[in-house]
Image (tube, helix red, strand yellow):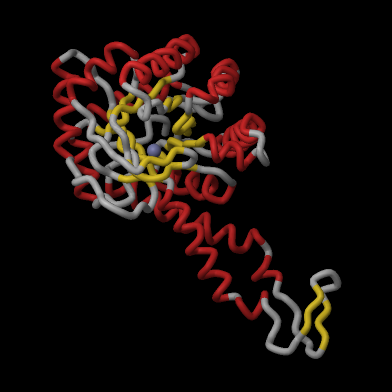
Amino acid sequence: VKKTVPFYGGQELRRVYERMRREGYAFIASNIAEPNILMGLLGGAQESRADLLLQISHGAMTFAGIGDAWAGLRALWHYIRELSAQYDIGVFLNLDHQQAKHLDLLERAIAERIPSSIMIDASHEPFEENVRITRHVVELAKPAGILVEGELGIIKGAEDEIVSDEAFYTDPDDAVEFVERTGVDLLAISIGTQHGVSKGRQLELRLDIAQRVDDALKAAGYDVPLVVHGSSGLSTEQLRQLIRCGVCKINRDTFYQYVYARTAYDFYRQHHDGIVPPEGVAFDPETFESAGGDWTPNKRAFDPRAVGKEIQRAVSDALVKFNREIGSAGKSLFI
Ligand SMILES: [Zn+2]
């Protein structure tokens, strides 16, 4: 298949998931909120010859739009579209952890065919309410060819604007009823992983839950890719095992945030002398003049593009490594 449009919608994404289920590999679904991580992910996916699933949460939209989530979504969307045109791989956009209270934004995003898929998170609601909200989003998204991911079971920790102290495993029978009644294309399950870096009592990791949910869905005639959130603490072997249980989407957000911060921290520490004047030298940033010495700041140290390139490289390397570990490298449907 030759790429003819900058990035792809739900129908192409469905084909990628079908092949993932057949051949046993997965997306590392990667969150973005600003350009450096986005650019790193595009480069890493191309280097891996793997398709790329980007995610934007409501908090990321709000950040990118200086408080206006709709403006932020459109700004990031345009940015992704323009940049992804330079790459051969398939690039997809998922709206991560959307909530019923932002339904108006979802309706506008669907009307403009912005996302390839939407994750509606009503997992904190009682089962019937979760079904009702998720079903409603499926009804809105389906005519536009946009896939919908629902969530059943509660994942511990803080993700964006959703915080949960308690966790519950997904029940396989509930999963079948949920898929049946909502018509979701993907199902996020709770197997004891955590969002972010959270302290306190942890659920025991239960990889077998993924297998039991997958078996129950298959027995009921549903071929639904499973999704695991909060994957930061999982080993490569655990991720591979989850993929064998039908998991096609593994969410990563926190890890890139750490890579970003650590890379910037190390870079600025290395270039300390180009940014911070020596002891006893007064420096006026407005005139770039220092009193009492011939010290001047070094542009190669403080130009945001210098640290930005380092961050992009580190994020790219991280994605290349993930894609190799979980078998996605070389699997792009579009090159
Ligand atoms: Zn999540």
From this view, report whether residue 187 is shown above or below residue 310.
Answer: above
Q: Residue at x 65, y 60 (%)?
A: 304
> Does the image show residue 92?
no
Rendering coords of residue 61 (x, y %) = 58, 36
In which image quadrant can residue 302 be found? Answer: bottom right
Q: Residue at x 28, y 49 (%)?
A: 325
Query: If the image is split into quadrants, where does the C terminus sit?
Result: top left
Query: If the image is split into quadrants, where does the N terminus sit?
Result: top left
Rendering coords of residue 316 (x, y %) = 45, 52
272 sits left or right of 239 in the view: right
15 sits left or right of 70 in the view: left
**For this rendering, which residue is in front, 14 or 60?**
60
From this view, report whether residue 261 is shown above or below residue 289.
Answer: above
Rendering coords of residue 225 (x, y %) = 28, 26
> Does the image show residue 236?
yes
Rendering coords of residue 286 (x, y %) = 84, 69
Q: Residue at x 26, y 51 (%)?
A: 201
**For this rendering, which residue is in front, 116 or 57?**
57
Q: Residue at x 50, y 50 (%)?
A: 40
From this view, report whether residue 272 is shown above or below residue 87.
Answer: below
- The extreme right residue here reads 287
**For this rendering, which residue is in front, 251 or 2?**
251
Q: Total label count?
A: 0
Ligand number 1: quarter of image: top left
